[in-house]
Amino acid sequence: MSNAKSPADLTITPRDVRFGRGTKYRRWWLNDDPIATAFYNALSVTFPKGEGFFIDSVRKFRDGTSPRLAKEIAAFTKQEVIHTREHVAFNRHVTEQGYDTSKLDARVDRELALTRGRPPIASLAATMCLEHFTAILAHQLVANPRHLRGGDPEAAALWRWHAIEEIEHKGVAYDTWLHATRDWPRLRRWWVKSLVMVMTTIKFFSGRTEGMLELLRQDGLTGRGVKWRLFKYAFGRPGMARKVLGAYLAFFLPGFHPWNHDDRALIGLVDSEFEAARLANA
Ligand SMILES: [Fe+2]
Ligand SMILES: [Fe+2]
């Protein structure tokens, strides 16, 4: 069975929640920290187009999948569609604060243009890699409340909500890849996925860094001092890049599967938080 490694009782549940309507986020909505805010803003700008690309890439391979995987692909699609809607709304907050995101948008367009004319399996491989990124970032985001501490409540809730759904569907692109490459020799599979991961990592890092620096430039923050602060944020404290490194590298191990690490406990943590928030708003 192609997706035997996903927990047997895993269910992927789209949560149709809206965030940040009828409210205004601070310009530096995360802890009054321009660096932290730029990190999440730059990521969010890429999501609507990026997630659209993920959906297209995965759905091209849904024919012939097991009934379970087909169902998971449908749930994954629903989740990503709602994420897109909410990040469009989030990005509106960003532009309302005076940020011009056109350069960041253009970069995403250029990255996606690279996939055109390539075989669909290349897009699926890139999606699988980026979904590994989102899953390990999501894990860290929920496991360590420090990342979103001091954030505007609705904005922080959006990121936590997105994070648990990314954890929940982290195996879908991977299982689709296993299905699509089921006739490949193992070594070829490993080689291609590793190569695509390396290329994706370079593009992701350089793209998001460029995006953050552009937003910070608009804050009047430029020069080597800012780059150093970015580096410290990523690799020092809170050190998102440092903390996900081990989970990132696990991808290259033979026998890797996103569900080798069962982190569903984190989902429960945030789900209950939503319950409380809904009651408080009622
Ligand atoms: Fe998503
Ligand atoms: Fe995702």
Image (cartoon, rainbow, N blue to C red):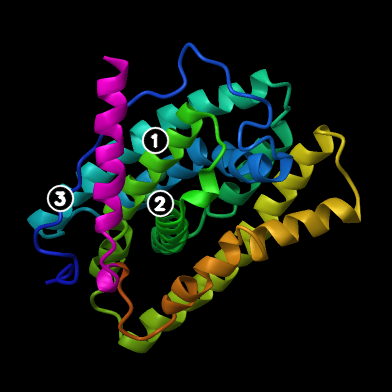
Pick the quarter of the image with the N terminus: bottom left
Q: Which residue is label 2 attached to? A: 142
Q: Is mark 1 within 8 Å of ligand 1?
A: yes
Assess whether residue 267 is covered by the magenta stretch. Answer: yes
Q: Residues within 10 Å of mark 1 (few under 14, many from 20)?
A: many
Q: Residue at x 30, y 73 (%)?
A: 257
Please tell me whether residue 272 is drawn above or below residue 176 in the rendered image.
above
The answer to the question of whether label 3 and label 1 lie on touching residues, with beta carbons closer than 8 A, is no
Residue 172 on image: x %, y %: 27, 57
User: Nearest the camera: 2 or 23?
Assistant: 23
User: Nearest the camera: 66 or 98?
Assistant: 98
Q: Which residue is label 3 attached to? A: 11
Q: Disc count in the image?
A: 3
Q: Residue at x 44, y 80 (%)?
A: 252
Q: Which residue is label 1 attached to? A: 83
- Left or right position of 60 against 216: left
Amino acid carrying mark 3 in the image: Thr
What is the secondary structure assignment of the residue under circle 3? loop
Please tell me whether residue 100 is drawn above or below residue 134 in the rendered image.
above
Amino acid carrying mark 1 in the image: His
User: Nearest the camera: 213 or 149?
Assistant: 149
